[in-house]
Amino acid sequence: MFLVRVCGACGSPGAALCRSCAARLEPAATVRCPEGAVRATAVLRFDGVGRDLVLGLKYRNRRDTVGPLADAMAAAVAPRPFDLISWAPTSAARRRGRGFDQARLLAVAVARRLGCPCRAVLSRQPGRPQTGLDAMHRHDSHGPAFVASAPVSGRVLLVDDVVTTGATLAAATAALRAAGAGSVEVLVAAATPLKDTSR
């Protein structure tokens, strides 16, 4: 059976990211740094083509988009040294439903490009999904919770696919710091545009 390769954003035949879509990607602007992290870096604005690309990976099994995303993510933090790269895991139910954890795929690919060790450190505790919740509910006591499976040390790079309010990454950062991480830096493929609160 012959499968036609298509763009992960627009679906047109060709590369995992066609030239037209690549030209329309918008870089992320200001990224909200999760509490406890020393720095947060996002590559793309979670809007337009960037949103289509990330959602293609997350919900349409477009794993071929991991390469282009990981290339850009690794370039954004190089040459800073990290002792460990890990990720904020999705829930077990979502991982079973999708057949993969998109944050893990990105973390492994970024680690390969940076030449750093990568391993699973966190497990996500049962709780309701964050998708569709507002900022208040993402950060409340029913928000995401993680526990570390083993001690960690040194500089840890925490990878995820997208940051919205930062609740998930703040909880993951707290778990890494509790497990012994000297510092935690966050790297995401895309960031939701911050709302203008000046008005």
Image (cartoon, grey):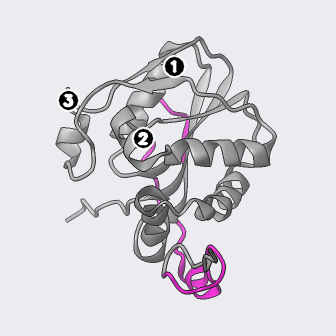
Vertical relation: 36 (above or below) 166? above
Classified by dominant secondary structure, the portion drawn in magenta counts as loop
Q: Is residue 18 left or right of residue 146?
A: right
Indicate left or right for 94 with 29 as reference.
left
N-terminal-most mark, 2 or 1: 2
User: Mark 1 or mark 3, which is nearer to you?
Assistant: 3
- Is 130 displayed left or right of 41 in the figure? left
Point 68% across, 21% down: residue: 154
Q: Is residue 137 visible?
A: yes
In the image, is residue 171 above or below residue 138? above
Using residue 148 as the reference point, say whether residue 117 is left or right of it.
right
Quadrant location, the C terminus: bottom left
Residue 98 image position (x, y, % from top left): 42, 49
State the residue in front, 147 or 28: 147
* Residue at screen point 59% across, 11% down: 151
x%, y% of residue 55? 42, 63
The label nearer to you, 2 versus 3, is: 2
Mark 2 and mark 3 residues within 8 Å of each other at the beta carbon:
no
Q: Which residue is mark 3?
A: 142
The amino acid marked with disc number 3 is: His
Q: Is residue 79 visible?
A: no
Dot 1 amino acid type: Arg
The disc label shown at residue 199, or none: none
- Does residue 29 belong to the magenta stretch? yes
Residue marked by disc 1: 177
Mark 2 sits on what residue? 95
What amino acid is at disc 2?
Arg
The answer for how far apart the CA atoms under marks 2 and 3 are is 20 Å
